[in-house]
Amino acid sequence: MPWVNETICNCTGASPASPLPAAGSASRTHVGRAPVFLPYVGMTLAPCDGCVSIPAGFNYAFPKDGKCREGAPLGTDGCTWRRAPSARMLYGDDLLAAGWDRAFVPDTDTNVSHTLANVAAFAAAVKARDKLVLAAPCG
């Protein structure tokens, strides 16, 4: 989180400027989460006086070193996370049908309307998909 003076890492390890977390770091084995604020695209990652700053959710990291094998319980061989046995999928067509605008419109320090419109489209797509999911039968 650069706005609190933490080291920026794109986690590719492609250059000394973006090293992977050190061996033994919990970042290599445990799910991580960092807050996301709007404006998101086209702005510096630092707080600014007088600009829009809207909490917009979280970015999550699911490191492969902590992933459980399919069907293995948590903790097996030190694994720390696994996929849920059932999942819902949203496809690009679902987002477009809900009003997603594919145009690249960067946020500004005073206008995040394009991003907020796409956030609303995403929520509408999730709601439409939820109507198709049936409750699991009892017993």
Image (cartoon, grey):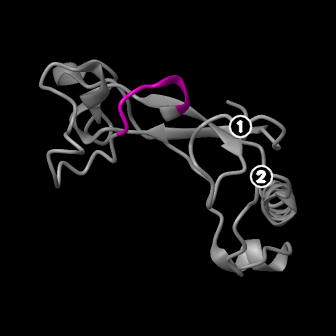
Residue 104 at x, y percent in the picture: 67, 77
Q: What's the magenta region?
A: 3-8
Instruction: Identify the residue position indicated by label 2 in the image.
Output: 109
The 10 Å Cα crowd at callout 1, few under 14, some 14 to 19, many 20 or more, is: few
Q: From this viewpoint, which residue is outermost toward the front?
A: 49
User: What's the residue at 28%, 18% (across, down)?
Assistant: 75
Q: Quadrant of residue 35?
A: top right
Residue 69 at x, y percent in the picture: 25, 39
User: What's the residue at 78%, 61% (across, down)?
Assistant: 115
Question: In the image, is residue 81 part of the stretch drawn in magenta?
Answer: no
Q: Amino acid at mark 2?
A: Asp
Q: Secondary structure at mark 1?
A: loop
Residue 121 at x, y percent in the picture: 84, 64
Disc 2 and disc 1: Cα gap in Å? 8 Å
Instruction: Identify the residue position indicated by label 1 in the image.
Output: 48
Q: Amino acid at mark 1?
A: Cys
User: What's the residue at 77%, 34% (across, down)?
Assistant: 49
